[in-house]
Each structure stands twice: as C-alpha cells, then as structure tokens.
Image (cartoon, grey):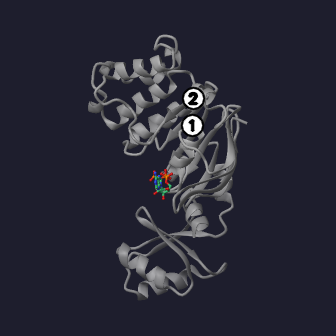
C-alpha cells in the first residue's frame, strides 16, 4: 500500500474536522477525495504530508510513519496545496530552482519528469509567478511539487478556479504522471472529475461516506432518477418539492433530477400534476445516476 490511514481523528477545538477516518491507497493508484468545502480534505492532506499531527490514529505514506518518519516522508512526497503555494515575486524559473535546491537537486536532473508540464510555461520563465494566469500558476505549482521525483503526489483541489480547458489538460497530465509510476491522491469538489479517478472516497463533515470505483459508486444508487424540464425552473422545483410522492429534488444544469418515493408509478400522473401547477413545456425522462446524485443521496 502506498497510503494507509487507520482511525485518524482531528479536531480544532470544538470543530471535529476528521472523525475516525480509515482507508488505503494502492501503489500507483489515482485516488480521489471528493467532498464539499469544509469536508476535511485539507486537514487530511496536512496530516499525510506531516504538516499537522492527528489527535488519534496512525498513517503511513510510502512505507513511512507520518509522525516517526516525517523527514523521510518529506523527501518522498510532493504536495501541491490548495492555496497558491509559490513565491509571487520570484519568476517561474526562480520558483522551480528554489524548490529544486531545497530538495538538494537541480532542474536538469529531473527535467524528464516535469518536461511535459514545464514546456507549456517555459516561454514565460522570466515572468513573476504572481503575474501568471490560473492555469499557468497551477502548472508551475505542479512542476515544483514534482521537481524532487516524489513517489506519492498530494494535490489539494488543484483545479479550483481553473478554466475548463486547463482542467481537462490537467487531468490528462495526471494520467501521464500515473503512467510514470507515481501514486496520486487528489481532492476536488467537482463531481465530473471524480469519474476520472481509479477509486474515490466521498467525504463530508469529516466522515467517509463511501469508497469505491466511480462506476461501482453510481451502480449502487438505489432509485430511478428522472430528468425533468419545464419552462419555469423555479416553479418546477417548488412544485416537485410540494408533490406528495417526491423523494428528492435537485437542480441539475437545465433540468431537475427527481426521484419518487414509489417504485412503480405512472409518469403521466406526475406530468398532469405539474401541468395543473401551471407549468408548461414539461418533459420527463429517466436518466443515469451520476456521482453527484450518489453523493447527495448518501449525504441526506
Ligand atoms: N486552523 C483551523 N482552526 C479552526 N477550524 C479549522 C481550521 N482549519 C480547518 N478548520 C475547520 O475544519 C473543518 C475542515 O476543514 P478543511 O479545511 O480540512 O476542509 P476542506 O474539505 O479542505 O475544505 P476547504 O476546501 O474549504 O478548505 C472546517 O469546518 C473548517 O472550518
């Protein structure tokens, strides 16, 4: 195993940020930690990268104990924190040199590993990091986290605030790093990114709700979901919530994801009800559950 957590708990005074967390990440796995703001993701990363002590439990990374072997862990892991971690006043190249130097290495020595990523920002190597776009900052931060050839890479919300094209490119880069033998633990609040991981842990309020492959997680969704559309979205949500048989109602893009308390029912009855509520253009179609649907169901 590359990462093992056993019964990890951590509180900040009265706030229980992590409650009895246990799970394992296999060698060379791309593992996602999926959860909303405040779920405890950053706290977990800080414990695993030896920046914070847990109150209870034990954790191992790359075969080392996070408390006893903290120095070895720091040599063997790369960490890209959620908040921008670079020196804004240093240039792109100076930032990378700085990180290489503190790990006792050079850019040349490990260029092969970062090449794919660094070539994209190399034309701006003399620009100060503070003046880079979101996507470029993220590439520089990733290059810096990789410059000492870590065995395990921790990425805390690496795509938050990054445009959709850069987000897609970033995930393609992660796949290539995985092919080079690096184990990756990545957190994200974006459910669509969860589908790109080998396995995911859904986390909320410091607790793991479920761990499995993205496919298996959606397979276990217990109900049929309907995509419902109408001309007045706001009224549609109100009416569905007021419907006596309604089980769950969530806005989902231009539709509402709806589940019913009954296992068998006439879709036409629901349509008639919505039309009686003065809604027009009503469409109802069954749809496949997504990771977001599963998360909402588990978090209920
Ligand atoms: N230093 C701190 N002092 C007090 N409470 C804290 C501290 N750091 C985090 N918390 C609280 O612990 C809980 C978990 O926070 P954490 O930052 O680990 O979550 P997160 O999933 O990373 O969310 P975010 O993306 O918002 O950082 C939250 O309720 C947060 O307010």
Residue 16, quarter of picture: bottom right
Q: State which quadrant residue 63 falls in.
A: top right
Disc 1 + disc 2, Cβ < 8 Å: yes
In the rendered image, the quadrant that contains the N terminus is top right
Q: In this view, does 70 lie above or below 233?
A: above
**Dividing the image into 4 quarters, which one contains the C terminus?**
bottom right
Q: Quarter-wise, where is residue 71 in the image?
A: top right
Between 142 and 119, the residue placed more toward the observer is: 142
Q: Secondary structure under badge 2?
A: helix
Which residue is most to the top? Answer: 108
Asked if disc 1 is less than 8 Å from ligand 1, the answer is no
Which x, y percent locates residue 26? 70, 38
The residue lying at 42 percent from left, 31 percent from top is: 141
Residue lying at 55% horizontally and 43% vertically, measured from the top left = 52
User: In this image, 157 relative to 262: left or right?
Assistant: left
In this rendered view, identify the residue nearer to me: 214 or 132: 132
Tell me the crowding category of disc 1: few under 14, some 14 to 19, or many 20 or more residues within 10 angstroms, Cα based. Answer: many
Q: Is residue 110 left or right of residue 224?
A: left
Label 1 belongs to which residue? 49
Q: Which of marks 1 and 2 is nearer the N terminus?
A: 1
Q: Does the closest atom of ligand 1 sit within 8 Å of the Cβ of label 2?
A: no
Q: Position of residue 39 (x, y in %)?
A: 52, 56
Q: Is residue 288 visible?
A: no
Q: How dense is the environment of label 2, judged by Cα within 10 Å: few (below 14), some, or many (20 and up)? A: some
The residue depicted at 28 percent of the width and 27 percent of the height is 89
Where is residue 24? Give x, y as percent.
70, 44
């Amino acid at each position: 195993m590359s990462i093992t957590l056993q019964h990890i708990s951590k509180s900040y005074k009265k706030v229980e940020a992590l409650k009895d967390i246990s799970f394992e990440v296999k060698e060379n796995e791309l593992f996602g930690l999926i959860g909303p703001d405040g779920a405890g993701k950053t706290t977990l990363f800080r414990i695993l990268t030896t920046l914070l002590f847990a109150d209870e439990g034990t954790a191992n990374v790359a075969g080392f104990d996070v408390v006893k072997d903290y120095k070895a862990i720091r040599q063997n892991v790369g960490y890209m924190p959620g908040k921008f971690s670079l020196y804004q006043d240093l240039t792109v190249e100076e930032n990378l040199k700085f990180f290489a130097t503190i790990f006792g290495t050079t850019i040349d020595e490990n260029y092969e590993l970062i090449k794919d990523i660094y070539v994209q920002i190399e034309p701006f190597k003399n620009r100060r990091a503070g003046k880079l776009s979101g996507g470029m900052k993220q590439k520089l931060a990733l290059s810096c986290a990789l410059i000492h050839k870590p065995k395990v890479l921790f990425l805390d919300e690496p795509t938050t605030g990054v445009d959709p094209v850069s987000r897609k490119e970033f995930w393609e880069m992660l796949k290539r790093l995985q092919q080079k033998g690096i184990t990756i633990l990545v957190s994200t609040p974006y459910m669509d990114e969860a589908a790109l991981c080998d396995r995911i842990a859904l986390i909320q309020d410091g607790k793991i709700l479920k761990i499995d492959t993205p496919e298996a997680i959606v397979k276990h969704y217990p109900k049929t979901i309907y995509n419902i559309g109408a001309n007045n979205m706001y009224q549609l949500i109100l009416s569905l919530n007021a419907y006596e048989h309604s089980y769950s109602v969530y806005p989902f893009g231009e539709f509402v994801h709806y589940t019913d308390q009954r296992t068998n029912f006439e879709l036409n009855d629901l349509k008639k009800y919505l039309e009686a509520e003065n809604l027009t253009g009503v469409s109802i179609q069954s749809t496949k559950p997504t990771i977001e649907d599963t998360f909402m169901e588990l978090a209920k």
